Image (spheres, helix red, strand yellow):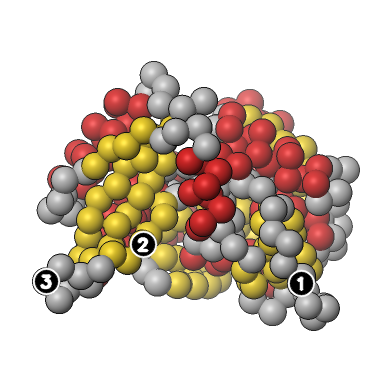
C-alpha cells in the first residue's frame, strides 16, 4: 500500500479554509505544522495523506479545483511519495496521548507513558491508515456531544467511523447496540482492530458502507442516537436519511462542518424536520445537535 503526501504552505488566515478542503480527501483529516517564518509572518504547512490508487490523480485534481474556487490556492500544492516506513514515523510524530474533556483519555497503542489514575475512561488507539485520533476539533466535538447525549442501553449509528474512536467511546458509555459505517476499506480495517483491542467488539458491528436506500428501510426508526463526523455537503445530502433511521425523540450529532458550510447544514436539517438543539464550535469547526420530534411531521 503506497501513500502520497500532499502539502501546501498557508498564512494564519488561510489555515482554516484550506484545512477544511484538504480534510475532505485526506485519510483522517490533515496534519498542520508551523514552519519558521521567512518574512516575519507566521506560516503553516498543511498536509494530507492519500492512497496512491486509481482515484489518486482525480482526487488531487479535485483538491486543486476546490482550493481555486475559494481563492485559497495562493501557494503550490506539493506532492511527495512516502517510503513504506515513513507512514508509521509520520503517524507517531503527530499522535500523542490526549485528554478529551474531563472524562476521556486517548492513548496511542505504542505509547509507554503511564496514565495517572484520574477516573477518566482510557481508549487505546492505533489509527493506522485511518488517523482519527481524537485530536481534530470535529472528533473532539463529537465525543463531547456523545458524552452529553448518550444514555446506557441506547442504539447508536456512527457514520464515517474512521479509526472507530466514537464507537468505542459509545460502548464504554453504555450503548448496547452500535453500527459503525465507513466507505473507506482502510478505515474499516483500522476500526475493527481498535475495537478488538479495547474489548468493545460485542456491542459494535463494523461494516463498509453508508446509509443506502436499503439501509434506510432496514433501520427505519431504529437508532436512539446518530453521530456523523463527515462533511457539510454529505450531512446535507443525508439529512432526510438521518431523520428516517432515528427513533421519534432520537438525537443527531453531526460535525466536520467548517464556518462556510454551517448555514447549508442548518437549512438542510430544518427542511428534514429536525429540531435544532445546539451548535458547538472549536477553532472554526462546528458540531450540531438536533432532534427528531416525537410528533410525527412526516411519515
Query: Pointer 1: what residue?
Result: 115
Tag 1's secondary structure? loop
Who's the residue at 45% across and 50% down the image?
A: 29
Q: In the picture, which quadrant includes the C terminus?
A: top right
Query: Pointer 3: what residue?
Result: 39
Disc 1 crowd rating (10 Å Cα; few below 14, some 14-19, many 20+) is: few
Tag 2's secondary structure? strand
Point out the tag, 1 or 2, that comes first from the N-terminus.
2
**Residue 245, disc:** none
- The percent coordinates of residue 249 (x first, y second) are 69, 60
- The percent coordinates of residue 25 (x first, y second) are 39, 40
* Viewer-closest of 45 and 93: 93
Q: Farthest top residue?
A: 54
CA–CA distance in space, label 1 to label 2: 26 Å
Who's the residue at 60% across and 42% down the image?
A: 128
Residue 80, placed above or below residue 199? above
Residue 277, placed above or below residue 21? below
Residue 192 picture quarter: top right
Kindly check if marks 1 and 3 are in contact, taking CB atoms under 8 A apart as contact.
Answer: no
CA–CA distance in space, label 1 to label 3: 41 Å
Q: Say whether residue 264 is left or right of residue 195.
A: left
**Residue 33, disc:** 2
Tag 3's secondary structure? loop
Disc 3 crowd rating (10 Å Cα; few below 14, some 14-19, many 20+) is: few
Kindly check if marks 1 and 2 are in contact, taking CB atoms under 8 A apart as contact.
Answer: no
Point out the tag, 2 or 3, that comes first from the N-terminus.
2
Amino acid at each position: 500500500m503506497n501513500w502520497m503526501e500532499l502539502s501546501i504552505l498557508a498564512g494564519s488566515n488561510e489555515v482554516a479554509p484550506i484545512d477544511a478542503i484538504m480534510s475532505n480527501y485526506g485519510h483522517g483529516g490533515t496534519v498542520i505544522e508551523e514552519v519558521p517564518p521567512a518574512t516575519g509572518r507566521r506560516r503553516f504547512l498543511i498536509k494530507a495523506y492519500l492512497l496512491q490508487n486509481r482515484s489518486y490523480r482525480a482526487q488531487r485534481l479535485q483538491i486543486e479545483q476546490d482550493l481555486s474556487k475559494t481563492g485559497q490556492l495562493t501557494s503550490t500544492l506539493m506532492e511527495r511519495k512516502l517510503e513504506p516506513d515513513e507512514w508509521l514515523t509520520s503517524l507517531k510524530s503527530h499522535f500523542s496521548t490526549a485528554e478529551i474533556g474531563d472524562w476521556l483519555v486517548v492513548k496511542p497503542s505504542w505509547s509507554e507513558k503511564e496514565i495517572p489514575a484520574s477516573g477518566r475512561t482510557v481508549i487505546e488507539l492505533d489509527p493506522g491508515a485511518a488517523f482519527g485520533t481524537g485530536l481534530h476539533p470535529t472528533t473532539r466535538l463529537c465525543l463531547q456531544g456523545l458524552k452529553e447525549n448518550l444514555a446506557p442501553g441506547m442504539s447508536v449509528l456512527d457514520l464515517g467511523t474512521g479509526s472507530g474512536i466514537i464507537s468505542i467511546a459509545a460502548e464504554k458509555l453504555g450503548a448496547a447496540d452500535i453500527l459503525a459505517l465507513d466507505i473507506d476499506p482502510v478505515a474499516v480495517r483500522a476500526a475493527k482492530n481498535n475495537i478488538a483491542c479495547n474489548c468493545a467488539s460485542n456491542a459494535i458491528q463494523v461494516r463498509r458502507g453508508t446509509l443506502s436506500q436499503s439501509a434506510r428501510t432496514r433501520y427505519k426508526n431504529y437508532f436512539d442516537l446518530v453521530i456523523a463526523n463527515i462533511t457539510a455537503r454529505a450531512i446535507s445530502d443525508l439529512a432526510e436519511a438521518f431523520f428516517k433511521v432515528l427513533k421519534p425523540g432520537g438525537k443527531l450529532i453531526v460535525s466536520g462542518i467548517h464556518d462556510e458550510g454551517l448555514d447549508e447544514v442548518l437549512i438542510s436539517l430544518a427542511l428534514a424536520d429536525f429540531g435544532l438543539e445546539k451548535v458547538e464550535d472549536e477553532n472554526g469547526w462546528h458540531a450540531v445537535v438536533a432532534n427528531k420530534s416525537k410528533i410525527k411531521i412526516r411519515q
